[in-house]
Amino acid sequence: MKSKDIKLGVNIDHIAVLREARKVNDPDPIQAIGICQRAGAEQITIHLREDRRHINDTDAKFIIRHSPLPVNLECAVNDEIIDFVVANRPMRATIVPEKREEITTEGGLDVESGFEKLKSVIKRLHEAEVEVSLFIDPNPVSLLKAKELGVGWVEFHTGKYANIYAMLYSNLADTPHSVKELELDRATLKKMLNSEIENLNEICEHARGLHIKVAAGHGLNYQNVSAIAEIESIQELNIGQSIIARSVFTGLEKAITDMKEAIKRV
Ligand code: PXP
């Protein structure tokens, strides 16, 4: 028997990316929220980056205060940002690694070497009654450290899965591990894909066994999402770029209902 449907968190950062491309006031990410709700999204996800390259403090404050959907705020271990989170109290803070020069969040948190700092940040967030999630790579070392840190949620980084999928099925893939570079044949890539799905399956089940709630995200799109959505112990997916990209052509409401359809459990 399948568990109940998986929840969709729509990451609306890319609306603000478009606004910031011209430093004007549209498109406004705040306007997206009612549309997300109407289309059946269960959560709004935003990332307040240290360099404020898209979502800014004014957006985040307004969204946290007025969103009818729960807000999941992604943030780095950075005192100024954590002060902001504690003061504004979104439903959840997802702690992510952040490098200024990266285009997007490239990997999971290094929970081992950041352990002590994470511990004090998580304590502050819990005292402010903010749920905490750690964005980690799907491996047991990171998961067990997350357990030790006492978080209620983890979000597993699906970037490796998405990259292998793109190498296998898309000629648009332009990742550092492109097919050409690695000279991998299709059979090898298929094996790699299956083994990553298996790995995700196992680690999500492991997390569930530890009573940690499981989310997943990064690089998920309309083509690759169904295998991840089928993993029963995942409760929620956070998806941004592919939804906002499709919305340019279809409108945001349709882009979200299409994604809801794609992640429906059969
Ligand atoms: N989840 C987390 C923790 C992220 O950092 C990101 C990227 O901002 C996403 C999900 C969404 O990734 P994408 O835009 O590739 O769907």
Image (tube, rainbow, N blue to C red):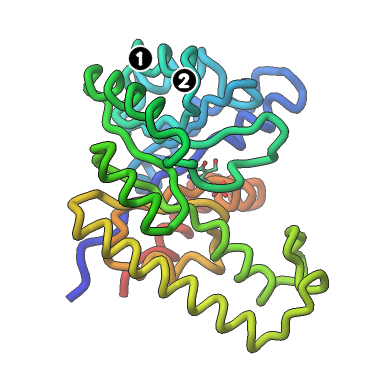
Q: CA distance from mark 2 to mark 1?
A: 9 Å
Residue 48: where, in percent of width, then height? 52, 25
| Residue depicted at x 45% and y 33% | 114
Q: Which mark is residue 88?
A: 1
Of helix, strand and loop, which one carries label 1?
A: helix
Residue 183 lies in what quarter of the image?
Answer: bottom right
Residues 10 and 211: in front is 211
Q: Secondary structure at mark 2?
A: helix
**215 lies above or below 183:** above
* Residue 119 place in picture, x, y as percent: 33, 28
Q: Is residue 262 above or below residue 90?
A: below
With 181 as the anchor, is 143 left or right in this view? Answer: left
- Residue type at mark 1: give it: Asn
List the residue tagged with mark 2: 60
Quarter placement of the N terminus: bottom left
Cβ atoms under marks 2 and 1 closer than 8 Å: yes
User: Residue 70 or 76: which is nearer the viewer?
Assistant: 76
Give the residue type that dot 2 points to. Ala
Ranked by sequence position, the earlier of labels 2 and 1 is 2
Q: Would the CB of label 2 be found within 8 Å of ligand 1?
A: no
Q: Residue at x 24, y 41 (%)?
A: 152
